[in-house]
Image: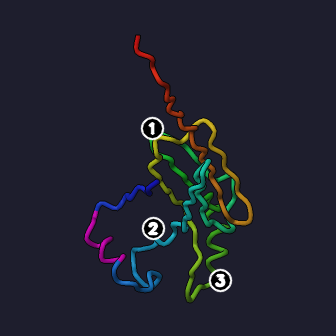
Amino acid sequence: MKTVNNNNMWLPNLLDNIFLENRLDRLNNYETFSNPAVNIIENLSNFVIELAAPGLHKENFSIEVEEDTLKITYKEVKESQEQEQKNDNAVQYKRREFNFGSFEKSFKLPENVKVEDILANYEDGVLKVTLPKMEEKKVLKRMVEIS
């Protein structure tokens, strides 16, 4: 299972992977910063996608499958502007490291996933999506008698 990369500019993405730097200090990089970390686990009977998303509300997650792509989306519910201004005036951040806004993660599904039996669970800040595999057809081997 592979993640779908939505970045069309290959050179900056390639250089970002080579040079390790503090991404928080870069300007205009908050869209990639707000993407949560993902673990993909393959067992004999299923795949499990674990998405680290602490402090988020499970009602705001959306999981959909379109053709061979699994899309996990989180839509942040905005507070009223008046409430938001009060919060901004009360707290001034010197550095803000955890800030999940809206995000979208896409995964290309293998052919052997049972799409109708996908399950999701959000517990302890981890969204866990279980993708069961289809049973492999066993090859029948039989001898044919020649008459």
Residue 136: % across, % down: 54, 38
Give the position of the C terminus as an image quadrant.
top left
* Residue stretch in magenta: 9-17
Q: Earlier in the sequence, mark 2 or mark 1?
A: 2
> Disc 3 to disc 2, how far (Cα)?
22 Å
Q: Reply yes or no: does residue 45 show up in magenta.
A: no
Name the outermost residue toward the bottom: 94
Q: Main secondary structure of the magenta part?
A: helix
Q: Which residue is mark 1?
A: 67
Q: Which residue is mark 2?
A: 31
Is residue 18 positioned above or below 124 on the image?
below
Q: Are marks 2 and 1 in contact (CB under 8 Å)?
A: no
* Left or right: where 105 falls relative to 75: left
Name the outermost residue toward the left: 11
Residue 66: % across, % down: 47, 39
* Front in this rendered view, residue 26 or 87: 26
Q: Are marks 3 and 1 in contact (CB under 8 Å)?
A: no
* Left or right: where 2 falls relative to 13: right
